[in-house]
Amino acid sequence: MCPKVGYGAWAFWPSAMRGLMMATIEIQTSRFGVVRCQSEDLIHFPEGILGFSDLRQFVLLDDPNDEIFAWLQSCSVPQIAFPVLEPELFSQNYQMNLTRHDLESLDMREYLQGLHSQVQVATAKLAAVEAPLKDAANTKRAEPIPGLRSFSIITIPDDPTQMTANLKAPIVINVAKRMAKQIVLQDNNLAIREPIFQKLQMRVVQNPQAPIKTQAADWGVAVRLPSQGPEASV
């Protein structure tokens, strides 16, 4: 029998201790039955998700029988699972403007330190002491940041042609640290309910042989479920 998920402050344990404690665990889900994965597959949300602030541990599931969505499954409430997709699938020019605070909350210290060092070098070369460093500490980062993956939560009503994506508040994951946060972006042009059915349909027409979710870059954070059924080990 595999141990049930206990969670607690798992994500804050020293990495060496986590390595010693990694084990196969079982997660009860209403959609996939019992899912087995590794403790290192868990994704920690220190602040929870909007509307579900008490839920801190999730796992991203890739169901091979579902050609469209991945599922962000709660590890403690079997009925809570959010369909998600990478926003680039239906919004080619999608950008996340993340603040320093956002990056700190995702434990991107190494990235921030590297950015700080780059600014110091540039400052020395340009003989400009204060302004660039101040800008680096407060700037919003629009370009892709290595090590982060983003997903939009999809809302699917009774009429699936009316499905929408939340572009305003993506789920952002630090892949290496398994740390995540739902970040409300300060861009008023991004919609909370962006219609996506026709855009996804267009992708199917353009590339009918490939499932929609495989047309994005490799996730690196999802647990692939076995095609033979949810009771098999993953």
Image (tube, grey):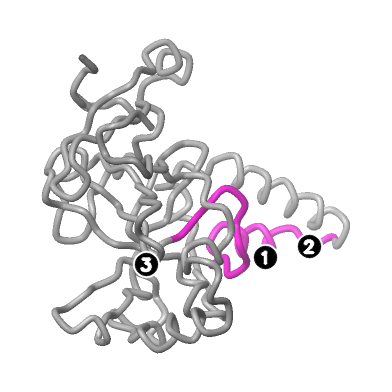
| Residue 64 placement (x, y as % from top left) | 40, 52
In the displayed structure, does residue 140 sit left or right of residue 105?
Answer: right
Residue 92's quadrant in the figure? bottom right
Residue matched to label 3:
152
Q: Residue at x 34, y 84 (%)?
A: 194
Q: Are marks 3 and 2 in contact (CB under 8 Å)?
A: no
Q: Which residue is drawn at 35% across and 17% down?
A: 23
Residue matched to label 2:
128
Mark 3: amino acid: Ser
Give neighbour class at mark 1: few <14, some 14-19, many 20+ (Cα, 10 Å).
few
Mark 2: amino acid: Ala
Asked whether 190 or 90 is in front, the reply is 90
Q: In which quarter of the image is the C terminus?
A: top left
| Residue 8 placement (x, y as % from top left) | 21, 26
Mark 1: amino acid: Ala
The residue segment tinted magenta is: 127-150
Residue matched to label 1:
131
Q: Which residue is drawn at 37% across and 44% down?
A: 227
- Residue 69 is one of the magenta-drawn residues: no
